[in-house]
Image (tube, rainbow, N blue to C red):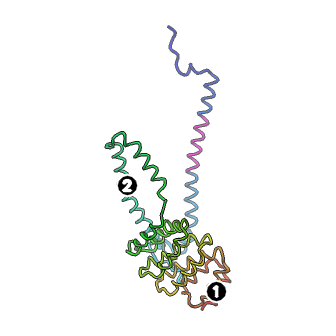
Amino acid sequence: MPPAMNTAAAIEPPHAAGQRLRERIFRGATFAAAVLVLVLLGGVAISLLKGALPAFSQFGFAFLTKEVWNPVTEKFGALAAIYGTLVTSLIAMLLAVPISLGIAIFLTELAPSWMKRPVGVAIELLARFHGDFTPRLLTEWKRWLAANHSANWATTDTICGALIGPLLLKYPSQCDGLRAWARHRNMWVRRASIVGLIHRARRGESLDLVYDIARRLHGDREDLIQKAVGWALREAGKTDMARLERYLRAGGAGIPRTTLRYAIERFPEAKRRALLAATR
């Protein structure tokens, strides 16, 4: 009986050499990819630190512990935004972790074999198409805001940016309904009436509606409403600065100074001074 031939001997020398080369290339490529990920993460960290340095040098670490955000008095704090982010993340985890663990346990330990495959596929599909909003959700979100489930501007703006804004981009016919929101007794609904349109304003869309709702809100005494209106006007002005200037000059003293200061941030310094003087 011939002696047993090991695997290495079974591979012909040219073939073995080529295989070793391919393995070295693969190991080098995976190592380079891993290093690239670390480099990118480091770059992101450096970029964030560089962007944050002016705020920390101006306001110190109190920037993280104060929630006031008032450009008129030049006092700024990120606590409200940080709090809103942490709370919404915690709520998401409280909902997602038990449900995902329950589904995983059911599929692996309890579900019959004929059910595991289709249920697993269905869950994966739902995870990929969770953003399929419908117009009826706008009413639900308004009801949620009106019930004061949003307790601060950061949470309200997150709802507008992640939910209301994308829905209005998809269903422009729903935008006119925000006029009624601007007269709502609840402050968060009124804020959402203008902040919810910022996605469209940045594209130069629904500008007539943005300016109309802004007029409706100029008489609102709430500081957070005045700031929101100024923010929306500033975004609307990015696509048509001349129209924004005409609007501000025509509004004159009827536009709150807080709103005005937010709205003119993108103008050159000389133009900002002229508008502040012309609208007294």
* Percent coordinates x, y for residue 194 in the rendering: 52, 76
Disc assigned to residue 97: 2
Task: Name the residue rendered at 51%, 82% in the picture.
Answer: 226
| Label whose residue precedes the other's in the sequence (1 or 2) | 2
Q: Secondary structure at mark 1?
A: helix
* Percent coordinates x, y for residue 21 in the rendering: 62, 31
Disc assigned to residue 180: none
Is residue 122 left or right of 245 when viewed as pictured? left
- 280 is higher (above) or lower (below) than 104: below
Indicate whether residue 15 is drawn in magenta.
Answer: no
- 16 is higher (above) or lower (below) than 180: above
Alpha carbon distance from label 1 to label 2: 52 Å
- The residue that label 1 is drawn on is 275
Is residue 152 left or right of 6 when viewed as pictured? left
Nearer-the-camera pick, 59 or 21: 21
Task: Name the residue rendered at 45%, 53% in the picture.
Answer: 126
Name the amino acid, label 2.
Answer: Val
Q: Quadrant of residue 137?
A: bottom left
* Percent coordinates x, y for residue 92 in the rendering: 40, 60
Nearer-the-camera pick, 184 or 151: 184
Name the amino acid, label 1.
Answer: Leu
- 272 is higher (above) or lower (below) than 38: below
Residue extent of the magenta highlight: 24-37
- 251 is higher (above) or lower (below) than 200: below
Other residues around mark 2 within 10 Å, as few (<14) / some (14–19) / many (≥20): few
* Picture quarter with the C terminus: bottom right
Indicate whether residue 32 is drawn in magenta.
Answer: yes
Tell me the chief SS of the magenta region.
Answer: helix
